[in-house]
Amino acid sequence: MITFFLSILLLVAGYFLYGKLTEKVFQPDANRPTPALANPDGVDYVPISNAKAFLIELLNIAGLGPIFGAISGALWGPSVYLWIVGGTIFAGGVHDYMSGMLSVRNDGASISEITGKYLGPVMKNVMRVFSVVLLVMVGVVFMVGPAGLLAILTPEWMDIKLWTIIILIYYFLATLLPIDKIIGPLYPVFGVFLILMAVGVGGATVIQNGTRPMMELTLANLYPAASQKPIWPLMFITVACGAISGFHATQAPIVSRTLRNEKDGRKIFYGAMVCEGIIALIWASAAIAFFWNKDGTNGLESLLAMGGGGSKSVYAICTGLLGKVGGAIALIGVIVCPITSGDTAFRSARMVIFDWFKLDEKNIKIRLSIAVPLLLIGYGISFINYNVVWRYFSWSNQTLAMIVLWAAAAYLATNYPNKNRCWIAAVPATFMSAVSVTYLMYAPECFNFGRLGMQGITISYVTGVIFAMVFLAIFMFTTYAHPAKSLERQKTDMIGRK
């Protein structure tokens, strides 16, 4: 229990200390008009209150990732706490704040357009395709997951296919209508369920510490021995949204187009990421305490038998800790979380395509022509094995986070007199490069070097580190070898601020 409360304390302290440092590095300008005030359009560019903006951002990013992902990460034991806490403070919070504020500085532009501006036109086109594919996969993951839970709670005739169609209809409305028509009014209500879910599961885990002891920190790999998998890089990919997630960067423009003051960015972007880290920590702790065999004979085998993080394990935890009534409240929160990320995933995909082809967002016919095919494609993908979609989503998610961090580092290096500001983004970018490439080499759905045993693991590790160092070397060369270009960009940006 000490580890759990210490981790919560560190996350809160991270918001006030490292979040403040991140803000100081970026230097938000309270006098600079935000996109919502400069270019209101009544659809996406709509000024809203900080409270609503925070809830929209939190509910956008806190989908199944910090729940299913954290529970799956619990298979490796309490070492997952280190990644959730450290990842949230030094990587996820920086990533979310920078992606949100860069969108604010670029008239609410989608992350693909921002990446192209700071990393070049080739990367812009790569990110356009990459973002749309990822967002559709996110929409599918966050559609099928809650549909599975709802199917468990309702009569037999209301099966997963029927619930998928019902959720799809809601997604259609949320994707198509202005942000203040559905998302704005509903999200505060959904936020209550989100808070009740987190408090309920976390509180019950602490109260039942005597019968289901919460494990203290250990660096040992506790993944069930019969099929043990290495912590690096698998846990760092599995626990995505609870530590760092590229998906968040695709959601940032939704809120960046509603902000009323640049100074509010830390509360909304960095703050929402810290809250998501706390949610992930609660679920990881609950899963370890709930499923760990007290006599130590088979550890977390029962969690693995349920498939790790999924509808079955979430249902078992909620009803086991809170009973039927409390479990029902918690499950509603678990269902609401992904639905409120899935709807904005499809909305973000629509926004990326509109930015890409310079389409008119006010034209309802054009919005329909983009929204309908996206949702139909998503429905088709929903028939593919859920675990397969989740694995591809996880890797592409962390790879996108890596690219966004490099774009943020490039912005900081070329728009301020002191280039060393860039390291607050360049360090986590290098780390995530190693994670992403190592997983690409190791995982069965990628190059599958893991099938070679220790030799394959070594090859994957070495390749990941080499690529990360190469990316860092390229970044350092382009940053420090061309001071004239950097000064020119810095002057341009300063003129824009005035």
Image (cartoon, rainbow, N blue to C red):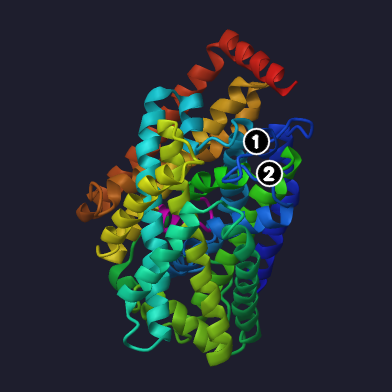
Specify the farthest residue to the left: 452
Q: Are marks 1 and 2 in contact (CB under 8 Å)?
A: yes
Specify the farthest residue to the top: 484
Residue bearing the label numbered 1: 35
For the magenta stretch, what is the residue range? 232-244
Q: Quadrant of the N terminus?
A: bottom right
**Mark 2 residue type:** Leu
Q: Quadrant of the C terminus?
A: top right
In-front residue for pair 64/365: 365
Residue 102 x %, y %:
60, 34
Residue bearing the label numbered 2: 259
Label 1 Cα crowd, 10 Å radius (few <14 / some 14-19 / many 20+): many
Q: Earlier in the sequence, mark 1 or mark 2?
A: 1
Residue 443 x %, y %:
28, 53
Based on the picture, tell me whether residue 239 belongs to the magenta stretch: yes
The residue under the point 59% across, 57% down is: 181
Based on the picture, tell me whether residue 463 belongs to the magenta stretch: no
Q: Is residue 37 visible?
A: yes
**Image position of 38 (left or right of 453):** right
Name the element at disc 1: helix
**Mark 1 residue type:** Pro
**Image position of 121 (left or right of 486):** left
